[in-house]
Image: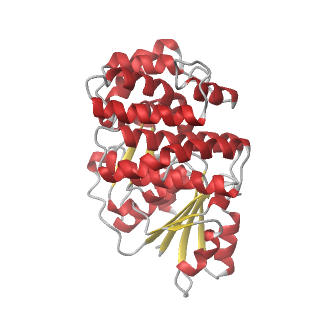
């Protein structure tokens, strides 16, 4: 991992002197990745370009695989979706595979030996640059499903806060909320470890304060803290899992086509309220949830004395975070989507077990 402002300029020095055959994955516009791509071309490397305009689908991954010409390196420079696309391409190309609709038929995605994978995030949100999974949209199943394995872990991650500053305001908000949700859900997860809790305990207050500052009065220190929170969230969730907010977001993202970070941000507050209620018989988990509530109220002063989350809720509303109804959810779908969300893989690591009715309560709270 290479972390710090300006670190992206070091990228050519991380590659071999001889011209490499690079598959370069970037977002729809390529704006954030333009400087990195120019530096690689100036260094004389052979570049094949793949644009990833949204979250990768099975068809998009296989279409990109079909145009590959035996790359020596895959470099993904973009948001979480771009990095997931790069991770999937590196893993599948190494093993000579295409992506089936049924991921259960994939052989083990064992560590790569030939293709090097480098990740440069341009958003401070998912922490995908340090995780061993890639989220793929599977329209035939109406779901977003992860492929996992050692082959998906980047060899090198370059986290440069200057790249994250290029994102539009709406993306900054959604990505930051995703990072904050990840450190909170990792910290409160029933599968949390001493390692993941150590990462998250410090990152939760840091990330909340940084999120507010990068939206309202950004400076390089705030961006570094936001990127550190995102990185910490990726390292933590890989060891702890997440929770109900992410479980529901995975279902809603596939069903509604809504942005993942915005979904997580909108679901976080009602998820915390429900988890607090259901954690009464597990004091250790309740203590962790209470720590998160205190950190939130410290960063966003409550607007109602008895509600630690009221200030945060008012803030995300004021910043234009859409409610689920504005993202396309209708009341008549809540019960069915709650059922699906309760079965999602992230929900199995939620702070406490929740009945389906609790997932309905969360969706109603975000509606």
Q: Is residue 258 visible?
A: no
Q: For this view, does 113 lie left or right of residue 327?
A: left
Q: Residue furthest bottom?
A: 18
Q: Residue 47's x, y, as percent?
A: 60, 72
Q: Position of residue 102 (x, y in %)?
A: 32, 44
Identify the colour scheme used.
secondary structure
Q: Nearer the viewer, residue 98 or 294?
A: 294
Lateral position of residue 133 relative to residue 257, left or right: left
**Which residue ends up furthest to the top in the rendered image?**
332
Question: Is there any visible trace of residue 78 in the rendered image?
Answer: yes
In x, y percent, where is residue 365?
50, 18
Residue 113 x, y percent position in the rendering: 35, 74
Q: Nearer the viewer, residue 100 or 291?
A: 291
Task: Name the residue: 59% across, 37% down.
Answer: 299
Q: Residue at x 38, y 24 (%)?
A: 276
Picture layout, residue 5 above or below residue 146: below
Looking at the image, is 179 positioned above or below residue 152?
above
Image quadrant of residue 310? Answer: top right
Q: Residue at x 68, y 29 (%)?
A: 320
Q: Quadrant of the C terminus?
A: top right
């Amino acid at each position: 991992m290479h972390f710090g402002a300006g670190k992206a300029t070091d990228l050519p020095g991380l590659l071999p002197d001889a011209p490499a055959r690079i598959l370069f994955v970037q977002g729809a516009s390529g704006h954030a990745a333009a400087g990195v791509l120019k530096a690689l071309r100036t260094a004389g490397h052979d570049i094949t370009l793949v644009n990833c305009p949204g979250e990768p689908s099975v068809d998009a991954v296989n279409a990109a695989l079909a145009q590959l010409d035996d790359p020596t390196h895959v470099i993904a420079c973009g948001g979480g979706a771009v990095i997931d696309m790069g991770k999937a391409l590196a893993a599948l190309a190494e093993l000579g595979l295409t992506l089936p609709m049924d991921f259960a038929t994939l052989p083990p995605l064992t560590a790569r030996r030939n293709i090097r994978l480098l990740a440069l995030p341009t958003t401070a949100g998912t922490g995908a640059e340090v995780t061993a999974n890639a989220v793929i949209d599977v329209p035939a199943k109406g779901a977003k499903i992860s492929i996992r394995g050692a082959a998906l872990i980047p060899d090198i991650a370059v986290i440069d806060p200057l790249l994250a500053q290029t994102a539009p305001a709406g993306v900054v908000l959604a990505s930051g909320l995703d990072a904050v949700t990840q450190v909170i859900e990792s910290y409160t997860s029933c599968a949390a470890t001493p390692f993941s809790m150590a990462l998250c305990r410090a990152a939760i207050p840091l990330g909340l304060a940084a999120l507010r500052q990068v939206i309202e009065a950004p400076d390089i220190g705030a961006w570094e803290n936001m990127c550190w929170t995102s990185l910490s969230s990726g390292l933590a969730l890989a060891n702890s899992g997440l929770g109900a907010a992410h479980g529901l977001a995975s279902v809603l993202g596939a069903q509604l086509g809504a942005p993942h970070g915005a979904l997580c941000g909108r679901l976080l507050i009602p998820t915390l309220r429900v988890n607090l209620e259901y954690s009464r018989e597990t004091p250790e988990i309740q203590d962790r949830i209470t720590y998160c509530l205190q950190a939130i109220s410290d960063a966003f002063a409550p607007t109602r004395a008895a509600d630690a989350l009221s200030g945060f809720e008012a803030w995300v509303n004021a910043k234009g975070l859409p409610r689920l109804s504005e993202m396309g959810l209708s009341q008549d779908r809540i019960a069915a989507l709650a059922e699906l969300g309760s079965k999602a893989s992230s929900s199995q690591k939620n702070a406490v077990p929740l009945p389906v009715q609790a997932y309905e309560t969360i969706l109603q709270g975000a509606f």
